[in-house]
């Protein structure tokens, strides 16, 4: 198998012109697409409709190529958009596709991708152990399918389930975005042996911050019945010229983690040279304003601003660092990072073309 | 002469506890203070009252030491606060004071500071050549007073005059903040021989963006009759252990400019080591979202967000870079940078203790 | 002819479920629809994509009924959405359709509607007299077509042209939203003999605030080549049970204007009774924070808040009054009201079922 | 006793010019002042420092008249400022003072005011029954002191205690603003026999929304050890020309409640006449966006906007109604109304000069 990734910068959430051209010219094989992941210029909050607009526009373009109705496309391709391009992050999306090669690869490990859906979750399962377990099961299945070992997994993107809240119905206390993200992240950590399984309990979710994944990037979408999972790793069973790596930022300005990530993929330092920059295909991060209101012992004001959400600041900070240090403004960064790296920190990952 | 700078992190705009303690203990000589410059956690806009609150609190503490009324302190000490500690910038202020030494210095150039006020400006002078000329005259006077050569000036902070707008009165079209800042910056550039004086005209202000200063940091305060100017440079006539340097960022993510600034002051790279960090006394920047809506050819969305001002994004981006790359969260960064560096870029400066 | 209006409350910008049902059940004749006008829960600003999402969703539903492609529907039906349901205004839309009756009406004047497009405008025409003239010509044509006399026009909704701004190209100084709206409004006023034609000049646009229309509601959409116009009035040539009326609010809290509007349509006072409320079909307003920063001599703070746009406050204020006094939360209110009523005031209109 | 109220509109949070003049001219007896209550143009949130600025400015002016230090004034005069003058509410404050008369009054009931402080609360008492009980005890004491019967109490303003949150210390789960306001409101209701005392329990706080006060207006201030209470009512033991009345709005647009309030104080309807308007001295309200996301069965979007807080919308809506219907823009309105009126509604009150 071989993974291909095409990147498109957009002039608005519904801008599919270049993608449409690429499809028309046969530069992308539509039926091979497994996922589209991108950033739109919304606020990233409850009333961010740019994600819906982007997915609708992409689905409309893809539907005829897939012999589907517009609304069915999402059942076949995982589409995960995050709102919020604060600061210097550019609105863009990555189209991820994979093709069966004729010959088995013999070279080094190369980028492997795979997607799956969990079984549907009941409202009372969201944020509880059943969600953790089913998420872990799916991640393991994906590793098997893609022939990726736990240590070679570099990014796991989850669009997590939560039941829509029905007025009049008894609300499940954990049927909310925070618990859904937290349970999904712990599920990933469990599948990848990142944490001690005996420490995983209902009580630990959103409580024991020492339990975390180094490669999770989970969100939650009200109304989604099944969580959607995209696994990104390296595997000897795959060929091509792409590779992934990851690190965990200890805190929101941990530039040593960024440098170390760059170095692992063969880059020399900050900022990347022009040639090096051409090799960068994807940058990913999950960020959070430290809830202790402190950064390295000094007060930050991201959480005490009632005019602007801390999520916007957190994306702006980590996005700025990744964009400025790499010189690449196509960075997928999202926020609320429960059990994603240590408190106040978060995972970062990169996909790059090899320089060999 | 010798310059001293004391830094105070704050828990709120009116937090003067530690400063008050320092005065009480005699750690700062109140009558030697020439300027206090700081960041508060306001929005940096028209309705940001945190600056007024900070100045009021500081004045109240200083008044008895200076035998003045609270409201008179501002006439004797330049107090310049900028709202907006977006992201990882910490609310703080620097108290800058200077003391006459007994012996003339014989060593290398050391930090020199001086403050002055322009003559009062009429509303029809603001944003016009008379403001440019008077600002330039004052800056030259300050260089002479402090024995600093034009090439040794590293930061010029101006709190610029604009007449208050009186309802019913004919509004002067240039009596606004943008023109006041622009004229002040060109005045600095003129005094320091940074620009060709024959190109300076009324028409050039806010029009010819090739005219700019590398060391300006100007703001404008409605109701201020005279501009207040703080000049920061190095001089052989001064002693002590502080030095300043500056660079111009070509664009908002120009980390090479930051590295070069660090190197000039004897630091080895990114991020600063723990020891190096202890030497950093002040970080200063003026930033702006590129009005062409582009960063290195790719779209940015800082100017097309009607929920959040571009000034907040610009401060967050440059503040993040300076704080993350130095490891020092006390960074004075302000926005709207007309004629401060090239379009989309801006000046940065640092004051550090020498390592000798 | 007879006008029908169907109202749909929405659960999100793309919510077309009930509308879709109504079409499926044959309750609305798709080919008779002339306009859809509505409110979405966006910010009403440059980065409000909820309008695009709503129009896309509606177009997708309508396309098969009209034998059109999704993107062609807008060429046949005027769709005008305004973002911003601040406070108690409910997201909703009105579908306006008209049907040829067999017999000529013999009763009193009834609601008449008509839509048209201007010729395309060049960038240098936007905000200038050619736009005024062509808008006026179209409005007159619409009055003739619909057999509505100038005094019987109660609301003229314009989605005005402005050329997209191309980077690199010389910007036309008036090719912006404010001038487009202003020229459109003066065009309406001219067609309806509301103003002295000798006072209309290029200089008067956005300058002479005594020139205004009592029934205009204009917006501007970057990229729109031709302005789209919906005229709403009463006419003896139309039948049915709907009637319109309008007033001008002298200022943003002019509840006497609202009462007078209600009374004209046969209502008894504030708030409407349950029965009366059933008769209300549409509420329309154009509002603005008084740019003199004063309301009846007392300061308001809508224009000096850098966190929240004055447009959001203005919509919230007038929307609150119309919704609370009528008890009907489906109110179409938009902002920026250059030459729409006196400075600080603006037009309001209502469509109601007659009680006969 | 006799109550006097002086109203001052402000040009900024620290504007005390007119108040200062009034003191200098002897128009107000400083030592008779019991409370100052006002609105500033902040955001009303955690990072609203306009309240602190206003109180500091007022205290500085009052201190010499009271032979106190600036920071001691708050111990003698209750100063309660609320941020947020959204829409048409004007920044202003009311100075409330009372003077012992020589002769006992013989006429009808007149405005009575009294202030007190509770005992200090421990963090684990905030939001619990001890806070309810002590608040009720104080309110009863105030009624006794001012000779006001429970049915004659029209407004009880509480600035409620909450312990500052210390990092590292175990957080008390109810030591937050919502629980403090809720417990204070229930305390008022208990003292005034508005609720069945057997229904009051720890569990009922922020849970049983049928328990509410009709006259409460409570806030909470982190760091305040004792709650401060201002009681406003009518009493035969007081003289003067002022009277108070109150109503409860059933929902956020309940204009019948407003009309009924106006009528009780002798006004004829909406809007007040010029003469009537002169009689209005104070308008007060507590408002909240209905947490069920519905207003009279139709969706509102105040709670699903991540850019603007629902508190700003709620204040704008109720403020608009009170200001527009009365014609008086000096309206004290604050938000978060736990146990203040029914869910989605809230108390309103007015103080007016009698027309006799």
Image (cartoon, coloured by chain):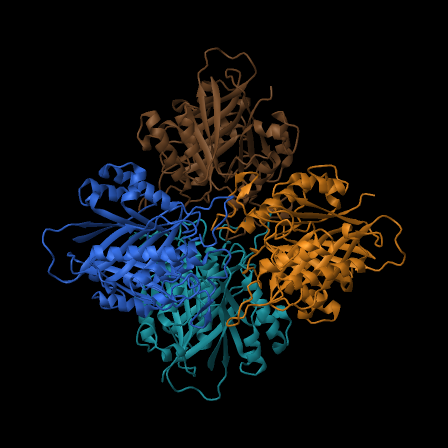
Chain colours: A brown, B orange, C blue, D cyan
* Image label count: 0
Can residue C314 be seen here? The reply is: yes
User: Residue B325 versus residue D76: which sits nearer the camera?
Assistant: B325
> Left of A270 or right of it: where is C73?
left
Quarter placement of the C terminus of chain C: bottom left
Q: Residue furthest bottom?
A: D103
The picture places residue B337, in percent across and down from the top left corner, at 61, 52
The picture places residue C15, in percent across and down from the top left corner, at 31, 43
User: Residue B273 versus residue C176: which sits nearer the camera?
Assistant: C176
What residue lies at 39% left-to-right and 26% top-to-bottom? Answer: A24
What residue lies at 65% left-to-right and 67% top-to-bottom? Answer: B121
Q: To which quarter of the image does residue A69 belong?
A: top left
The picture places residue A228, in percent across and down from the top left corner, at 41, 30
Can residue D296 be seen here? The reply is: no
Q: Residue furthest left?
A: C103
User: Residue A26 versus residue B199: which sits nearer the camera?
Assistant: B199
What residue lies at 73% left-to-right and 59% top-to-bottom? Answer: B139
The picture places residue D18, in percent across and down from the top left corner, at 54, 76
Q: To which quarter of the image does residue D237 belong?
A: bottom left
Q: To which quarter of the image does residue C21 belong?
A: top left
> Left of A25 or right of it: where is B139?
right
> Left of D312 or right of it: where is C329?
left
Q: Is residue D24 above or below residue B245?
A: below
């Amino acid at each position: 198998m071989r993974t291909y990734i095409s990147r498109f910068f957009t002039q608005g959430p519904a801008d599919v012109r270049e993608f449409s051209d690429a499809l028309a010219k046969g530069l992308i094989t539509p039926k091979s697409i497994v996922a589209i992941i991108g950033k739109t210029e919304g606020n990233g909050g409850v009333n961010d409709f740019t994600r819906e607009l982007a997915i609708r526009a992409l689905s409309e373009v893809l539907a005829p190529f897939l012999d589907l109705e517009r609304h069915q496309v999402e059942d076949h391709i995982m589409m995960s958009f995050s709102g919020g391009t604060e600061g210097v992050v550019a609105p863009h999306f990555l189209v991820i596709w994979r093709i069966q090669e004729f010959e088995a690869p013999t070279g080094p490990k190369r980028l492997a991708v795979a997607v799956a859906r969990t079984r549907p979750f009941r409202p009372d399962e969201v944020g509880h152990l059943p969600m953790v377990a089913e998420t872990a099961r799916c991640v393991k299945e994906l590793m098997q399918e893609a022939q990726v070992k736990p240590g070679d997994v570099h990014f796991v993107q989850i669009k997590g389930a939560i039941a829509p809240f029905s007025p009049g119905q008894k609300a499940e206390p954990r049927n909310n975005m925070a618990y859904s993200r937290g349970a999904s992240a712990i599920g990933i950590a469990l599948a990848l042996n990142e944490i001690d399984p005996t420490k995983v309990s209902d009580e630990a979710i959103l409580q024991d911050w020492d339990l975390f994944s180094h490669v999770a990037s989970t969100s939650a979408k009200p109304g989604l019945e099944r969580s959607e999972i995209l696994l990104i790793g390296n595997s000897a069973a795959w060929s091509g010229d792409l590779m992934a790596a990851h690190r965990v930022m200890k805190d929101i300005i941990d530039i040593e983690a960024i440098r170390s990530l760059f170095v692992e993929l063969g880059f020399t330092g900050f900022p990347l040279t022009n040639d090096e920059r051409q090799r960068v295909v994807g940058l990913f991060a999950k960020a959070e304003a430290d809830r202790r209101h402190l950064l390295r012992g000094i007060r930050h004001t991201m959480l005490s601003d009632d005019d602007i959400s801390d999520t916007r600041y957190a994306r702006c900070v980590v996005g700025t660092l990744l964009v400025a240090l790499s010189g690449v403004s196509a960075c997928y960064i999202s926020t609320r990072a429960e059990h994603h790296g240590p408190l106040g920190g978060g995972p970062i990952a990169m996909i790059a073309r090899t320089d060999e």
